[in-house]
Amino acid sequence: MAESATERLAAEGVSIWLDDLSRERITSGGLQRLIDTRNVVGVTTNPTIFAAALSNGEAYDEQVRGLAAEGKDVHEAVFEITTMDVRDAADVFGPVYEATDGKDGRVSIEVEPGLAHDAAGTIEQARRLWEKVGKPNTMIKIPATVEGLEAITEAIASGISVNVTLIFSLKRYREVINAYLTGLERARAAGIDLSTIRSVASFFVSRVDTEVDKRLSSLGTPEADSLKGKAAVANARLAYQVFEQAFDSERAKVLLAAGAHKQRPLWASTGVKDPSYPDTLYVTSLVAPDIVNTMPEKTLEAVFDHGTIEGDTIAGTYEESNELLDRIAALGISYDDVTQTLEDEGVEKFVTSWNELLETVSAALQEARAKETVR
């Protein structure tokens, strides 16, 4: 029987993680089916995913009734609900975690997005989430804001595995790697076993094309039009070059020799936003060893159905990728402005989703209390 596209992708060294989680997906066996049939070896969550999960179906009703009866406020309820999903998903992925010696089988949960510019608050909540879930295959998601860098170092230094999220620029990515290595150095000095710490760096892809394409369209020239749909892949490929260089440094080699692991790049935002682009674009164009690609289910199914996996599609592309970004810059489109805009918008979108999540849970708690009063 011929290998599936997801099997070929995994064989090339790409870990496939699902960018979605819900209680129904866990309890129905749907998550396990994706592990068994689609080579899924991890899950990422974010406030948008939880907001969608909580607003659909009845899977959370029983827990909400219990939390309402206990007098929990909305923030406490959200904390209990989301950590329960992550804990249960971590159990589903336990065999993958064991089989890969901790490399995969990971489930990520994000600190509250309102803390994105609050280093101390982020550190405190990262520790609370880590302790509450209590599973070694958890990762705590921390955004790569300036303030987030301090929190990343502190979390790693404490032995917490971290998924760094919302990375858009190569400069910030270098700072993220530095924060990781600094955390490892501190952990080693504290006597923590470095082999127990894992991290990924979530480099966002499709949103770069969305923003750059919008600016190219406003120029309305043939040259600008010819560059559409190319910036995101070029940017991610150059991020992989940064990864290769950073973990080939003497500083990294010392830590790796002491048992540490590389912080793998993770391609996030891999669902195509422009329907005129191939729906597998941000998967098939970004294949290389030691990376993670976290996909929404629609993208995962597209890859499984008709993805063409042709080996490493990043090696040998760095010169071409640099030239492409230079051509875009020559048209007056600022790379720094694009990436900062995307970071700011990313935080804002997650805050909006978080508020929607709070509203959904608050309404559910009120409804549960009202029904109890009637009884």
Image: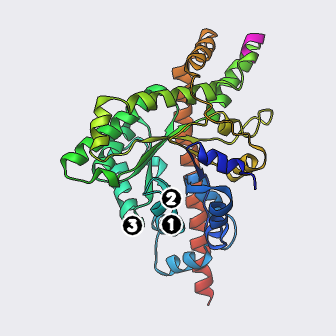
Q: Which residue is mark 1?
A: 95
**Sooner in the amino-acid sequence: mark 2 or mark 1:** 1
Above or below — where is 270 with respect to 47?
A: above
User: Residue shown at 62%/66% (left/top)?
Assistant: 32
One can see residue 184 in this view: yes
Circle 2/circle 3 CB separation < 8 Å: no
Q: Which residues are magenta?
A: 221-225
Above or below — where is 130 with respect to 365?
A: above
Give the alpha-carbon distance from disc 2 to disc 1, as whole Å: 7 Å
The extreme right residue here reads: 276
Name the secondary structure under disc 2.
Answer: loop
- In depth, the one of 216 and 102 nearer the eye is 102
Circle 3/circle 1 CB separation < 8 Å: no
Query: What's under tag 2, amino acid-wise?
Result: Gly
Q: Residues within 10 Å of mark 1 (few under 14, many from 20)?
A: some
Query: What's under tag 3, amino acid-wise?
Result: Gly
- In depth, the one of 119 and 189 nearer the eye is 189
Residue 259: image location, x then y, percent: 30, 48
Disc sitting over residue 166 in the figure: none
Above or below — where is 202 with respect to 4?
A: above
Give the alpha-carbon distance from disc 2 to disc 3, as whole Å: 15 Å
Residue 109: image location, x then y, percent: 48, 56
Q: Which residue is mark 2?
A: 105
Name the secondary structure under disc 3.
Answer: loop
Disc sitting over residue 134 in the figure: 3
Left/right of residue 214 with respect to residue 110 in the rendered view? right
Circle 2/circle 1 CB separation < 8 Å: yes
By secondary structure, the bulk of the magenta-drawn segment is best described as helix
The extreme bottom residue here reads: 375
